[in-house]
Amino acid sequence: MNATLREGIDWVGYVDWTIRDFHGYTAERGTTYNAYLVRGKKTALIDTVKAPYGQHLLQNISALAPLQSVDYVVCNHAEPDHAGALPEIMAKMPNATLVCDQKCKDALSRHFDISDWKFEVINTGDTVSLGDRILHFIETPMVHWPESMFTYVPEEKLLFSMDAFGQHYASSQRFEDEFPLETVIQEAKSYYANILMPYGKQVAKVLQQMDAFNIEMIAPSHGLIWRSHVQEMFKAYRGWAAFRPKPKVLIIYDTMWGSTGEMARAILEGAALPGVEVQLIHIRSSNLTRIATELLDAATIAFGSSTLNAGMMPMAAAVLTYLKGLRPAGKAGLAFGSYGWGRGGPEAIDEYMKTMKWEILRNPLKAQYRPTAEILDECREAGKLLAVKAKDLAE
């Protein structure tokens, strides 16, 4: 299933069709572990694959070049889905030097026995010549690990971008223009929201660096290769890194006996103003990956839970804990929910929102046992407040 990017540059990775749980990320379309072989007067392998698929990688490489002809193995990132096969690869490529930065070498030494590997440790701006092509290295710390790095081939205007611009997307085709652009952008958005969202400042800095490079193709380490919509991908990343919101309201909730759900639907009614996108998400009918993806460009959020044991429902707490780690910025919101003989659910949500430094639009909306008509009216007014605020933030 090799695919040619440019003459002498081929995809040699592995398509993981059946994976759905990628350490907590719900990969509904599966994923790929992309590796690339660059052949010139010298030959370089750009990244490897997850450990169980090392033999597939070796077979793909062998179909194009003898293993002993590989001069360099570039490790852009030490995470096991990209570096896991390195021990097998380095053992089968006796003439190869592993190229990475110092942080990557240090990380690899904590994963593997690297005592027999030959290394060339590089810094930003360093290059390796393949004779008729140059590999130019750009360190991109915290996009999304400390040792992350890009590799650029100026002669081909080709960027090997590691996890940046990637998607979890298994397919028999290799390029983004072989699928509807909206679908690929959505998968890239989901990947950004769940992997790169905490590092928006670092992503924005790297995007500024990329302005100095002439890039016509982006080859990430997951998913499809960008060759026709590179600028659209850059534009989307700039918006996501800046937390640029749409006029969009999310109503996220969990409910025990339906009372909090009734409040959520009343908030939905109030928020449904012209020009505002509104989404209602029942936590246990959704998943963390989808919720984080929708939150990325939402302006305002109503988050609700019934009260259980003086706190919120367990899955509501799980969602908020996950979101807190992703550090979504520039949001405004409010808490709501029902309680019985003991309070605590909406109040706990309110504290989470304050910890995330969201603008709190009002005190928590609360209903004891069942929401009264008056409380449902108050919910509708709160929905309208969310919608108006969403329009303001999106301007």
Image: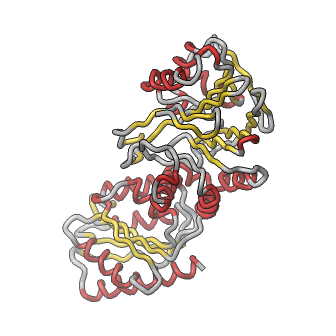
65 over 328 or under it: above or below: above
Seen from the viewer's position, the closer of residues 38 and 365 is 38
Along the viewing direction, whichever of 240 and 305 lies nearer the viewer: 240
Q: Residue at x 45, y 25 (%)?
A: 56
Residue under the image location 41 percent in, 46 percent down? 25
**Of residues 150 and 204, which is closer to you in this image?**
150
Q: How is the image coloured?
A: secondary structure
Residue 207 in picture, x, y percent from top left: 70, 54
- The image shows a total of numbered marks equal to 0
Q: Nearer the viewer, residue 329 or 36?
A: 36
Q: At which x and y percent is residue 298?
A: 49, 69
Of all residues, the one furthest to the left in this rendering is 257
Using residue 53 as the reference point, say whether residue 304 is left or right of it: left
- Left or right placement of residue 255 versus residue 120 in this view: left
On the image, the x and y values in percent for residue 85 come to 51, 24
Q: Residue 122: give x, y in percent of width and height.
A: 76, 30
Quadrant hosting residue 268: bottom left
The answer to which quarter of the image holds residue 382 is bottom left
Residue 287 as seen in the image, left or right of residue 324: left
Give the residue drawn at x 80%, y 33%: 126
* In the image, residue 134 above or below residue 316: above
